[in-house]
Image: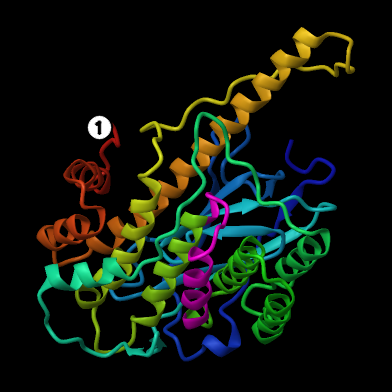
Amino acid sequence: MPCALGGILLAATFALTPPDLCAQPPLRGAIKHRAVAELPLPRDRNSFGIGEQVEFFIDPPNAEGPDAVIAWYVNGAATVDPVVGASTIVTLALAREAGTISVAAARRDAALQVDGQSTGKTEKTDLRDWVRKQAAVFPKVERQPVEGAAPAAIELPKELSAELVRMDHMRKGFDTKLDEVDELGRKLLEKYTDPKERGQIYYWLAHVHGQSGLRKPEKVVEYAKKGLELPIELLQMPTLYCYWGDAVQVARSGAGEPVPARRKWSAVVYLAGLREMLRYPLPHKAPELPAVGRGLVRDGENKVHLRLQAKQIAARRFAEFQREMIWKRDILVGQIAALYRQAPDAPEELRELALGVLRDPRDVERFLRAVKGGSWDP
């Protein structure tokens, strides 16, 4: 129940725009929130339990105008997903004791650079050729297969796990000391050489930067790319692609490049993440979570019961994995849909992007249907 021991209390007042964002246009809309789950409790409450999800949004949704790029960040035991957009989902993490979190959003459409590319006006090029060149450079890594069971987590040395937890605890919203985060990452990368270990270091570097207001989008892109070139956990893969695409949105949103000119740069990244996800068969709708029998069973007391309980736990974990993957898939699609809902309409450009990245015509049609709010059903 919300406010139970170990739960989290969400602050009723939200953080203000940070001082070093004063050059950015202020938010014109109001930040509002509501619980995601339909419970007997009111959705507009301020107290939430561990693991609960809360939607934060700008009201009215179009208050900031078509060229605005809004980044969300949180101070406390929680994460935002996606980072960029007119709305986001805040997921409350496990905390040692009840406390408060603050959630904020800020305009991030300043002139920046990413990968050495200026965010100024770009020359008109053949779209099909451009997509083909972009798709060719995305990481190509064999991920672990999924055969009716949730993939196992990557095992790390205890010392490294503790350091990565410490890195995550360095998150303080827009006040995160990113130079210190980068220095910790540099030391860990010098010490740990196994690809799986390095993949986790890059993932958490991208995560901390991504959850801290995208103040250094070029670093998010760098860490996400390097992480995706290594054997990371499957659920981390779409998260890195989302951070990457969100960072590109921020980096390319400077003066002189309106949404119609810049949106393909982020869309092609989100599509690359979607392409990797479509390698794994997923139901078009999130499955219900199977029940697990209650009660403790001691070894040798009832082997049949033990086997049944183990199967129930495995089935539930697999369903949880599928639900998480479907949620990540929907976020990637939602980021693209948000970009292409803005005027002017460009259905042929979006189709060309999808064909160039996804390639399979059936996947393209399913994607285009999902962008319009349809089902992923084949």
- Identify the secondary structure beneath mark 1: loop
Residue drawn 51% across and 29% down?
148
Q: Is residue 184 above or below residue 63?
A: below
Residue drawn 18% across and 43% down?
365
Q: Is residue 364 left or right of residue 241?
A: left
Name the colouring of the figure: rainbow
Q: Quadrant of residue 190?
A: bottom right
User: How far across and down, in percent of the image, does residue 337 sit?
Assistant: 28, 56
Q: Is residue 326 left or right of residue 40?
A: left
Residue drawn 20% across and 61% down?
353
Q: Nearest the camera: 50 or 25?
A: 50
Q: Is residue 24 above or below residue 361?
A: below
Q: Is residue 237 above or below residue 225?
A: above
Quadrant location of the N terminus in the rendered image: top right
Please say whether residue 83 is visible from this viewpoint. no
Residue pointed to by mark 1: 378
Q: Nearest the camera: 158 or 171?
A: 158
Q: Quadrant of residue 205?
A: bottom right
Q: Quadrant of residue 211?
A: bottom right
Please say whether residue 42 is visible from this viewpoint. yes
User: How far across and down, in percent of the image, does residue 284 sit?
Assistant: 36, 33
Q: Magenta part mainly helix, strand or loop?
A: helix
Q: Is residue 319 above or below residue 340?
A: above
> Does the magenta portion include 229?
yes
- Amino acid on which disc 1 is placed: Pro
> Does the magenta portion include 192?
no
Residue drawn 66% across and 65% down?
194
Q: Nearest the camera: 114 or 189?
A: 189
Magenta range = 218-236
Q: Is residue 313 left or right of residue 163?
A: left
User: How far across and down, in percent of the image, does residue 320 sit?
Assistant: 57, 35
